[in-house]
Image: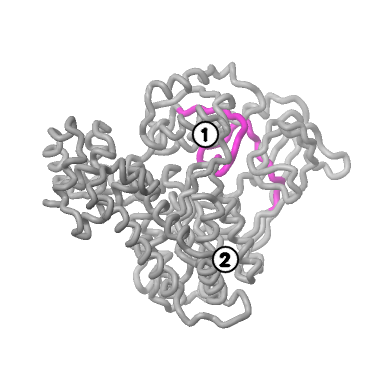
Amino acid sequence: MTQSQALEIMKTGANIFLTGEPGSGKTHIVNQYVSYLRSCGIEPAITASTGIAATHIGGMTIHSWSGIGIKTDLSRHEVDKIANDKRISKRIRASDVLIIDEISMLPPYALNMVDSVCRRAKNNPNPFGGMQVIFVGDFFQLPPIMKRQDEHSQVALLEEMSARFAYGSSAWESANPITCYLHEQYRQDDKEYLNLLSAIRANNFCDSHLNHLQSRKIDYHQAPSGLPKLFSHNLDVDSVNNQMLSKLPGKSQAYEMFTDGHRNLIETLKRGCLSPENLELKIGASVMFTKNSPKGLFVNGTLGTVEGFDAGSNYPIIVTTAGRRVTVERADWVLEDGGRDLARITQFPLRLAWAITVHKSQGMSLDGAIMDLSSVFEFGQGYVALSRVRRLSGLHLLGWNKRAFEVHPEIVAKDVDFKTSSEDDGLVFAKMSPEDLAKIQTDFINLCGGQPGLIVEREVKDFYPIKIKKIKIDTYNETFKLWREGKSVGEIVEARNLKENTILSHLEKLCEKGKIRAEEFLKLIPESFCKFLPEVHDVFLRLDTSKLGPIFEYFDGKFSYENLRLARMVMKKK
């Protein structure tokens, strides 16, 4: 789906899951949608799962916005208490659109709690109290931190992994978001490097890809100067930055952060701000900008070197890697509520950039970086780091471990469903006339009170999803007609101009509806895989799951997701 298509769908008021590979423009689309809403007189609630992500989009954490804080569970009494808090209740009741960025890092229990608080505060039983919700993120990136018991059986561990993500929550299911999967790429311009990243994303990383990375391996003393180093642990980052700063000659200049507002909210801003509370700089220091310049002089992630300090103001003077000379002024990070500042911190939008953690690099685009991935400990951590860099020539690797090139196996399978759903929804909107689409969009704005005119006395769900569900049945029927004509999957793919995974998904749904018998799929299974069917079916039953991720993990990648999907389709008769 293109960015423009996604934006048009968002304007209808439907619940949305906006996703895509790193660099596909998710934040750009969110900013465009926010600008559109504000031009219509509607102020959306802009939130994110982490403080860092919240500062990138100019919002606050979803935990603070909803009042759930750090809780992992809420009783009915606690939900009522939060929803009756005047400040929180006023904020939620005033919101018609809720945006949650970096949804991949939000645990399912947290999303459920937000949903409960919103329903109670708005006294509305609909998902999230009837608000439009926009989930933004990429589940291939860093997952949420979940508390685990010390010991698990293999089955229990796999079950826990499959329920780890926000899409596994009841709140997600009830919101039933339309998936807008962006396929355009605006960060990487190196085809070879894009193929490598795509291989990691599909869990198809192999020796040929490793050979490319081998060519970028260096020893520490060979690391080019002026590039940031990415590490998986804070201790490594602090050690490198402090060591490098101490080696520079001359006197250092220290800049303290200014703060204003409620102490707890200030602490929230500090945790999400990439600039340190106490910034120490010297001439020659390698730095990175931590915020976009309103004047377009730099963006979050722009690298440079301290050239000096202004004689009058003592502000740092930075020369960027592109050669631009900038006298840097202080910037503000603000938490707002209804146009009122709740908390503010002020600091120069800079940080030492000899080293940075992978976690804090999310959302950045770098021309070059030095990475040590030898201590990567989480699925997707290496992928996040590698996808920060625009091209292979800008990558310099100190080392890696096996986990550095692995993504969560559950997400690989789920991603197929997301792409299929996005393609189906794209077809729906392609069939809509511009007049019908414009009317839906206008109805939503009127419903939110954003423009003069008659307010439609209906919930958003009443005038949008009913239409889309009706058309979705048609797209399945088109596939069904071709199947009944005896067409092969390949012929259906060609006739409908869709991807094979999409067609297989249609056939599986048609089987669930009873239109196709499961045994009809036997002809699709490769002969070489047939002998493994009893073993695969047995594992599906023993693990008591219909998800492909746990099965793929159990067999350690022995069978492809396509073959496991076919095995699952054949099982429908059991």
Q: Is residue 22 above or below residue 429?
A: above
Q: Give the range drawn in magenta.
A: 346-373
Q: Is residue 308 above or below residue 418?
A: above
User: Is residue 371 on the magenta stretch?
Assistant: yes
From the viewer's perspective, tell me whether residue 429 is left or right of residue 522. Answer: right
Residue 259 occupies which quadrant of the picture? Answer: bottom right
Residues 352 and 426: in front is: 426
> Looking at the image, what colour scheme do you see?
one colour
Q: Where is residue 340 in the image (x, y as percent from the top left)?
A: 66, 68
Q: Spatial distance from mark 1 to mark 2, Cα to Cα?
A: 38 Å
Q: Residue furthest front?
A: 485
Residue shown at 69% from the left, 45% from the top: 349
The residue that disc 2 covers is 44
Label 2, secondary structure: give it: loop
User: Is residue 551 on the magenta stretch?
Assistant: no
Residue shown at 54% from the left, 60% from the top: 8
> Dot 2: few (<14), some (14–19), or many (≥20) neighbours within 10 Å?
many
Residue shown at 53% from the left, 74% from the top: 443
Residue 327 occupies which quadrant of the picture? Answer: top right
Q: Where is residue 428 in the image (x, y as percent from the top left)?
A: 43, 59
Label 1, secondary structure: give it: helix
Q: Earlier in the sequence, mark 1 or mark 2?
A: 2
* Residue 420 in sight: yes
The residue that disc 1 covers is 235
Residue 299 occupies which quadrant of the picture? Answer: top right
Residues 502 and 175: in front is: 502
